[in-house]
Amino acid sequence: MRSALVSLLAIASLATASTLDANCPPGQVFCSFPGGAQVIYVCNALSQPVVQATCAEGLKCYEDDAANQAWCGWP
């Protein structure tokens, strides 16, 4: 039973990574909100999202898709 659960978690992890990779072209900058935090990510050369910055408390993450930019600012 335990090995089945580990296998299931590994498959779910691979599926999630593949989904992120498909949506993360190298150089892409975007905001995400893990656990309510305001975080700026950039996609690396391997198409993996990497934390670029975390906004200070009270600030909000904004993004401009056309300019491929993200920043922290007052709401």
Image (cartoon, rainbow, N blue to C red):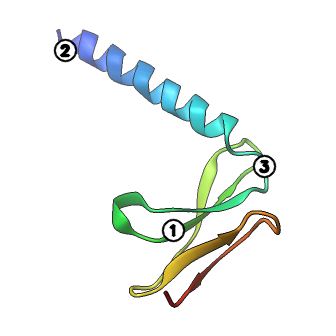
- Residue where numbered disc 2 is placed: 2
**Where, by quadrant of the figure, is residue 36 drawn?**
bottom left
x then y, percent, for residue 32 = 51, 60
Q: Secondary structure at mark 3?
A: loop
Pick the front one: 7 or 73: 73
x then y, percent, for residue 22 = 68, 34
Q: Secondary structure at mark 2?
A: helix
Q: CA distance from mark 3 to mark 2?
A: 37 Å
Pointer 3 or 2: first along the chain = 2
**Where, by quadrant of the figure, is residue 29 drawn?**
bottom right
Q: Which mark is residue 39?
A: 1
Q: Is residue 1 above or below residue 72?
A: above
Q: Secondary structure at mark 1?
A: strand
Give the amino acid at mark 3.
Pro
Pointer 3 or 1: first along the chain = 3
Between circles 3 and 2, the one closer to the viewer is: 3
Residue lying farthest left? 1
Q: Is residue 54 above or below residue 15?
A: below
Between circles 2 and 1, the one closer to the viewer is: 1
**Where, by quadrant of the figure, is residue 52 drawn?**
bottom right
Give the amino acid at mark 2.
Arg
- Residue where numbered disc 3 is placed: 26
Q: Which mark is residue 56?
A: none
Pick the front one: 12 or 4: 12
Q: How many marks?
A: 3
Is disc 2 in contact with disc 1, using a CB cutoff of under 8 Å?
no
Which residue occupies 81% across, 64% down?
Answer: 66
Q: Is residue 40 above or below residue 42?
A: below
Which residue occupies 51% across, 90% down?
Answer: 74
Which residue occupies 59% across, 39% down?
Answer: 20
